[in-house]
Image (cartoon, grey):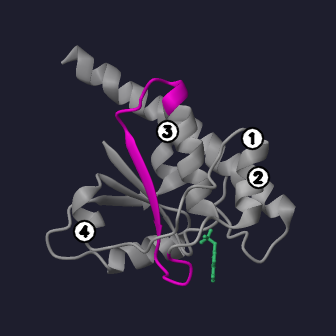
């Protein structure tokens, strides 16, 4: 199982989601699930996550300082099972760029995980032009969705075991 989290810049939301997912998958013993992240935009390619994203993840015990931004590639649509998008604009962009033969399934990260945001559209709000509290909010959403993702993946492993 290979999951790619996608946002716009790959320096705020998707690296935080990648860090939260890696941490929760490791704690759950689901290390065979592979996680990566990418952005639809190319402005920050090669850069580490935004310092506010690094600081927020670190406050929650997760180190994302070693991640480097990259842009979504055509090959990602073949390599990954799921492309999990941060918001509806990302979702539309990712759907529009699907190459011929790219079989990856595409959804919002929160919707795919089963995390109930309580009536919203499932978008993870872009914190880039916001303050520290916006990053903290993003962490709370991506970490809750990562927890829900672990429950979803555990459920899939259990049903496979029953076959
Ligand atoms: P992200 O946030 O999509 O959560 O990584 C952004 C980072 C950079 C930009 C936009 C959003 N930007 O326009 O440079």
| Residue 118 appears in view | no
In the image, which disc is placed on residue 56?
A: 2
Q: How far apart in space, not on screen, are marks 1 and 2 (Cα)?
A: 7 Å
Q: Nearer the viewer, residue 145 or 4?
A: 4
Q: Nearer the viewer, residue 5 or 163?
A: 5
In the image, which disc is placed on residue 75?
A: 4
- Residue 97 location in percent, x, y? 32, 79
Callouts 2 and 4 close, C-beta under 8 Å: no
In the image, which residues are magenta? 26-45
Q: Which residue is mark 1?
A: 60
Of labels 4 and 3, earlier in sequence is 4
Of labels 4 and 1, earlier in sequence is 1
Callouts 1 and 2 close, C-beta under 8 Å: yes
- Residue 132 location in percent, x, y? 85, 62
Crowd class of label 1 (few under 14; some 14 to 19; many from 20; radius 10 Å): few
- Residue 71 location in percent, x, y? 43, 74
Circle 4 SS class? loop
Q: How far apart in space, not on screen, are marks 3 and 1 (Cα)?
A: 18 Å
Q: Nearer the viewer, residue 36 or 147?
A: 36
Q: Which residue is mark 3?
A: 149
**In the rendered structure, does residue 13 fall within the stretch colored magenta?**
no
Left or right of residue 96: residue 66: right
Callouts 3 and 1 close, C-beta under 8 Å: no
């Amino acid at each position: 199982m290979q999951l790619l989290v996608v946002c716009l810049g790959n320096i705020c939301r998707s690296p935080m989601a990648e860090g939260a997912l890696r941490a929760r998958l490791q704690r759950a013993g689901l290390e065979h699930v592979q996680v990566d992240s990418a952005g639809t935009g190319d402005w920050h390619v090669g850069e580490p996550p935004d310092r506010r994203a690094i600081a927020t993840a670190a406050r929650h015990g997760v180190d994302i300082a070693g991640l480097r931004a990259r842009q979504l590639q055509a090959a990602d649509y073949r390599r990954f099972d799921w492309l999990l998008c941060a918001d509806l604009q990302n979702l539309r962009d990712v759907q529009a760029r699907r190459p011929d033969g790219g079989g990856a399934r595409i959804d919002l990260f929160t919707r795919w995980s089963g995390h109930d945001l309580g009536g919203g559209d499932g978008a993870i709000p872009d914190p880039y032009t916001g303050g520290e509290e916006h990053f903290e909010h993003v962490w709370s959403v991506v970490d809750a969705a990562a927890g829900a993702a672990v429950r979803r993946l555990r459920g899939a492993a259990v049903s496979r075991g029953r076959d």
